[in-house]
Amino acid sequence: MPIPPHYALVFSLLLFSVGVAGVLTRRNAIIILMSIELMMNAANINFIAFGLRLHNLVGQVFSVFTIAVAAGEVAVGLAVVLALYRNRDTVYVDQIHIMKG
Amino acid sequence: MAAAIFYILASVALLSAVMVIWSRNVIHSAIYLVLTFLCVAGVYVLLQAEFVAVVQVLVYAGGIVVLFLFVIMLVNLQDALGARIRTHATVSAAVGTATTILLLYVAASGRLVSGFGRAPDLSAQGGNLEQVGWALYRDYLLPFEIASILLLVAMIGTIVLARQKY
């Protein structure tokens, strides 16, 4: 017997909030990528919980796609971090201000 | 029984997620990230998404975290220990707290629970893997192929970006 879906929704919103806090407070680009992964996981939990509530499998299929996209995103993101480290010698995003952001 | 397991998994996942963003050593963050992903996979099992749980363990805990560890070891992060730079800390804390309170308000207002009847037992209709496979290869074949093209593009982009010489 599965758990009620709204338990998972509350859990996912707390996980998402932790990810948001990580993106906002940390300045290390690798930790920021990890926090983005946490937020994607929270979104995945939502997909699956709503799929369970709506009695179909589309949520699970879509979360498989989300995982694939997350894998690609993390590979490209870490390559960017690596290229940035080679050129600027830092992974701290507030020391990288070429674009005056 | 399932609710008790869910509470344990969810609290471990949330605690280790907090440790991911709290710990000063990046390696420790990566290890806590593995723990979070494994607990989330357990939650998927409780939500009757066994296939997604297996994919989560393989791709996230097995692939993505190893990728993180490789990059952490390639990048010299000795100055990272103890250096948690906090610019705009007040604004960040305010925005984060406001988001959390808003989401918790929505959760507490009862709108999430209303309309949630008793959860259906999907396992009665056959195995989860078989059903997901049918849905994936029959109804969502085109998105599946597009996802594979996306992965190919990401692979080429990663190689080009991380190459030593431009």
Image (tube, coloured by chain):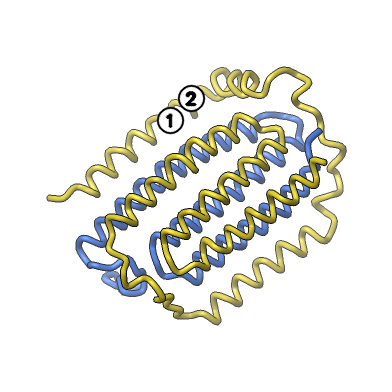
Chain colours: A blue, B yellow
- Report the amino acid beneath label 1: Ile
Residue A32 in the image: above or below residue B134: below
Q: Position of residue A17 (x, y in %)?
A: 62, 62
* Residue holding disc 1: B146
**Which residue sits at x=82%, y=53%?**
B111
Q: Residues within 10 Å of mark 1 (few under 14, many from 20)?
A: few
Residue B3 in the image: above or below residue A39: above
**Which residue sits at x=34%, y=48%?**
A76
Q: Position of residue A35 (x, y in %)?
A: 50, 58
Q: Are marks 1 and 2 in contact (CB under 8 Å)?
A: yes
**Chain where mark 2 sits:** B
Residue A51, label in figure:
none
Q: Residues within 10 Å of mark 2 (few under 14, many from 20)?
A: few
**Which residue sits at x=77%, y=37%?**
A53
The answer as to whether the residues below labels 1 and 2 share one chain is yes
Q: Position of residue B34 (x, y in %)?
A: 51, 49
Placement of the N terminus of chain B among the 4 image quadrants: top right
Res. A43 visible in picture: yes
Residue A55's quadrant in the figure? top right
- Report the amino acid beneath label 2: Leu
Residue B142, label in figure:
2
**Which residue sits at x=43%, y=65%?**
B25
Q: Secondary structure at mark 1?
A: helix
Res. B166 visible in picture: no
**Chain where mark 1 sits:** B
Residue B107's quadrant in the figure? bottom right
Q: Position of residue B37 (x, y in %)?
A: 56, 47
Q: Rounded to the nearest whole Å, what is the CA distance between mark 1 and mark 2?
A: 6 Å
Left or right of B75, for residue A13:
right
